[in-house]
Image (spheres, helix red, strand yellow):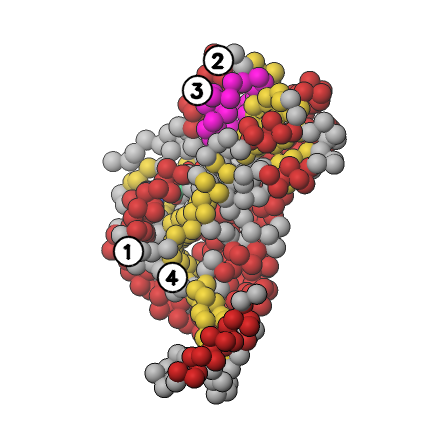
Amino acid sequence: MTAVHVPGIPVIEAGQLVSTSPATGVEAGRLPVATDVDVRQAVDRARVAGEWWAGLGFTGRRDRLLRWRALLAKRIEQLAEVVHAEGGKPVPDAIVEIVTAIEHIDWAARNAGRVLGPRRVRSRLILAEFSGHLEYQPYGVVGVIGPWNYPVFTPIGSAAYALAAGNAVVLKPSEYTPAVGQWLVDSFAEVVPEQQVFTAVHGLGDVGAALCRSGVDKLAFTGSTATARKVMAACAETLTPVLIEGGGKDAMIVDSDADLDAAAEACVWGGMTNAGQTCIGIERVYAVDSVFDTFVDKVVTRAGRLTVGPEGADIGPITMPKQIDVIRQHIDAAIASGGRAALGGPTAVQPPYVHPTVLVDVPEDSAAVQEETFGPTLTINRVRDADEAVTRANALPYGLGGSVFGRRRAVAIARRLRSGMASVNSTLTFAGMSTLPFGGVGDSGFGRIHGEDGLREFGRAKAITRRRARSLLPSMTFERTPTDMARLVKAIKVMYGR
Ligand code: NDP
């Protein structure tokens, strides 16, 4: 019997996971669902492939990863169409996402050897007769679990860095975007046909859970904080280390000396790109009293111009149909508790679309301020000054990114945000800067992808000392004499006793 397809809701049909466009219901992907045994076998195969891959060294891997990057660049429109067909994301948003992923592959490939390769480290006087050596060795097999909202950028943010570090990767894409995940691993296999270094297993959340228990050497999870807790619990059974990129509720602060046109433009982009379904999307704005009204007007004007629809519009459908209820509840509750819709509001929710909505003066304890809304909605609240803005921005358990618009105090304010990242006079830009680490604090997770920290996340530090001379003050031996120890004590007092 063939299951009925509700647009955007994945179904399993005869052992196949079927994904559909949330806008049209047209089938986008059909991939075999992995059993627990399949997942384990994929990891076992990846372990063999990983040894071969690690053996290629940094240069061999760099060449292959750069060829993969080139393939993605050549086929960027094709991949953007797959992302659009499966998740409903407007093609220009998909292209921006893929461009960012390509940049990360390039940087990770080119810099892995420098960041992770063997190097001498300085020894200290206390062990001057030894040299120190450090390198970061691959874990083996890294499991990557990804969400649907950035089905290229998020898995590649972990996978490209893990691969560059010498690991094999088994990806479990979101059930909403399996075709995109399969496209990524298939394209990789075109440039690395020898071994199954980067593969995917498909299915619902239980397949992700199976991957956590499959014997992977590290698990990189990107998704909601609620699922992150389950992932950590499963990985705890085998002490499998985890990297957690969780949810967020990022705030933007508009200070009194901000360029309000630039702030409004960035706010609308940061809050409404990808229909607001962005972990680092701007969901809350705190504007200081002196600029509040002008800023809100500018945001409303710009957001009011955005088009909504299946093709060629600025805002596409909400990818996960059940999220529409959450968005509706947040809007309704904000208004019921005294907030005002400066744009949109309850009527903006027209499944599978949500039209741009700007809510002002929303009580801070409202769900629209406290929880991920994941729609093209913004709350903008008035604050006395930047200090109050920082206090409110920092009041939630989440701490992913954030944004500050202003001149004199902007960088200082950005540093005070309790978050892993911040953009000054822009929004979301830190995600595309491959030289910077990406990750959160608190409920937004821990560990880092991207940049040097992102490479080190996928390598085990290996420390080696090597004797290069006889010890003048032997102490770590039973051959030591009372005189040696007396000399050592004297030396320590001279060196550190002041
Ligand atoms: P989910 O947490 O629902 O799912 C994430 C992934 O985990 C999916 O592949 C899912 O599979 C899988 N999964 C579900 N249950 C389990 C389980 N028990 N064990 C292991 N894996 C499981 O998140 P969404 O896909 O809805 O993504 C949106 C969330 O991701 C938002 O909270 C967003 O903020 C966050 N996010 C964070 C980013 C960051 O970098 N910090 C970036 C992008 C998004 P399935 O889909 O089959 O259920």
Q: Answer left or right for 336 relative to 47.
A: right
Q: Residue 440's spot in the image, x, y percent?
A: 50, 44
Q: Nearer the viewer, mark 3 or mark 2?
A: 2
User: Does the CB distance between marks 1 and 4 fall below 8 Å?
Assistant: no
Relative vertical location of residue 18 with respect to residue 200 in this rendering, above or below:
above
Q: Amino acid at mark 1?
A: Thr
* Camera-side residue of 78 and 221: 221
Q: Quadrant of ligand 1?
A: top left
Question: Of marks 2 and 4, which one's residue comes earlier in the chain?
Answer: 4
Q: Which residue is mark 4?
A: 141
Q: CA distance from mark 1 to mark 2?
A: 46 Å
Q: CA distance from mark 1 to mark 3?
A: 39 Å
The count of marks equals 4
Question: Of marks 1 and 4, which one's residue comes earlier in the chain?
Answer: 4
User: Does the CB distance between marks 3 and 2 fall below 8 Å?
Assistant: no
Residue 329 numbered mark, or none: 3
Q: CA distance from mark 1 to mark 4?
A: 14 Å
* Camera-side residue of 210 and 473: 473
Q: Answer left or right for 81 relative to 202.
A: right
How crowded pointer 1 is (Cα within 10 Å; few <14, some 14-19, many 20+) is rated as some
Q: Which residue is mark 1?
A: 238
Q: Residue 309's spot in the image, x, y percent?
A: 55, 27
Q: CA distance from mark 3 to mark 2?
A: 12 Å
How crowded pointer 4 is (Cα within 10 Å; few <14, some 14-19, many 20+) is rated as many
> Which of the image's four quarters has the C terminus?
bottom right
Q: Which residue is mark 2?
A: 337
Relative vertical location of residue 171 with respect to residue 13 in this rendering, above or below:
below
> Which of the image's four quarters has the N terminus?
top left
| Residue range highlighted in magenta | 349-377
Question: Of marks 3 and 2, which one's residue comes earlier in the chain?
Answer: 3
- Going 29% across and 35% down the picture, which residue do you hit? 2
